[in-house]
Image (cartoon, grey):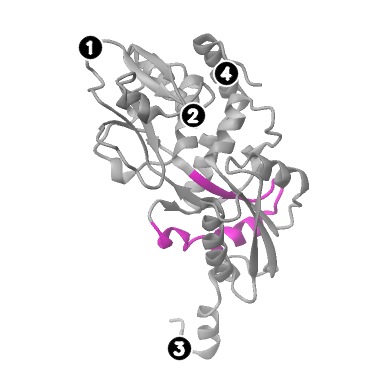
Amino acid sequence: MTDWGHPARRAVLGLPLAALAAPAVAVPDRAMLLVPGPEEGRLAQLGRALAGVLSRGLGSAAVLHVQAVGAADGVTAANRFAAATPADGQGLLLLPGAAGQALLIGDGRARFEPRHWPALCGAAQPALLAGTRRLDAPGPLRLALPSPAAPEAAVLLALDLLGRPAQPVFGANPQALLAAGAADARVIAGPGLDLAGLRPLLALGSAALPDPALAELPTLAQLLPDSARPDLMAAVEAASLAMRTEAVLVLPPLTSADLVALWRAAAERWPETGPRRFGPAEATPLLAGLCPDAQVAVAYREWLLRRFNWRPA
């Protein structure tokens, strides 16, 4: 039997989890976490909370600095990360769902490729379709949308795949469209979910990121028919994750397996710090769903062109 009361054994028990996971790898004593701006925005605050957890997970005198870059959609931060961050384990990025949406629609500003970035952990938010009438009520469902480029437009694609008649109603304030009687339903997403008196219709959950708090609602993924085109179903999944993903923490491509293991071990306690926070096991499939392959993105852009005559700038 191992004597865990022996002084040497007690010393092992006192080591941080990251050191136990990869004892041969040097723990970074200073690292930089890029986050989408602004400096006092929600993602910067999330980054600072995450930096504290990771620093404690690494142990020793590890310090993780947070630098806010660009706007909240994360495109500028992701571009800088892709262009200038070496794979030495000392640079990380907090990638928001909006940056994945920019890639999906072919936003010309997005010059990064996240499909080979090791994912560590992240934070989710609720999202659902809500309206003033039942989903199966007679007549086309008038869906309020901010723009064809918004991830909410994928709900219209899902309704098309379901064979459910629906028509878009565009406006900068979807809630005002419902209040004026010009629309029947809208997507509501964000950390503080306020239905504003609307009826919940569908949860925008996914296999990669289920939402137990909305488990009583059907999800788009559950309703889509097996006969639907796989690339379009994956596009619906990607846009749903763009709305559900507050941010996912990633490392640069080609980071060594030992360094990835070190950071993932440091992130293991992150889900304990708050609701809808997920760890390494959930982060990898989430990033794969948020940033699907080029075939899925092309299929979605072709649908945008057919449905709205919309092309990326």
Mark 1 sits on what residue? Answer: 138
Q: Which mark is residue 219?
A: none
Type of amino acid at the residue the image marks with label 2:
Pro
Residue under label 3 = 5
- Whole-percent x and y of residue 261? 60, 58
Q: CA distance from mark 2 to mark 1?
A: 26 Å
First in sequence: mark 3 vs mark 4: 3
Which residue is at 64% across, 71% downward? 62
Image height check: is 235 above or below 15? above
Give the distance between the C-alpha atoms of the residues marked 1 and 4, in whole angstroms: 30 Å
Q: Nearer the viewer, residue 313 or 62?
A: 313
State the CA–CA distance, disc 3 to disc 4: 62 Å
Residue 155, percent from left and from top: 41, 24
Give the x, y percent position of residue 276: 40, 51
Q: Are marks 1 and 3 in contact (CB under 8 Å)?
A: no
Q: Residue 252 lies in magenta, yes or no?
A: yes
Q: Nearer the viewer, mark 2 or mark 3?
A: 2
Q: Is residue 2 visible?
A: yes
Q: Amino acid at mark 4?
A: Arg
N-term mark: 1 or 3: 3
Local crowd at mark 3 within 10 Å, few (<14), some, or many (≥20)? few
Q: Quadrant of residue 100?
A: top right
Residue linked to disc 4: 301
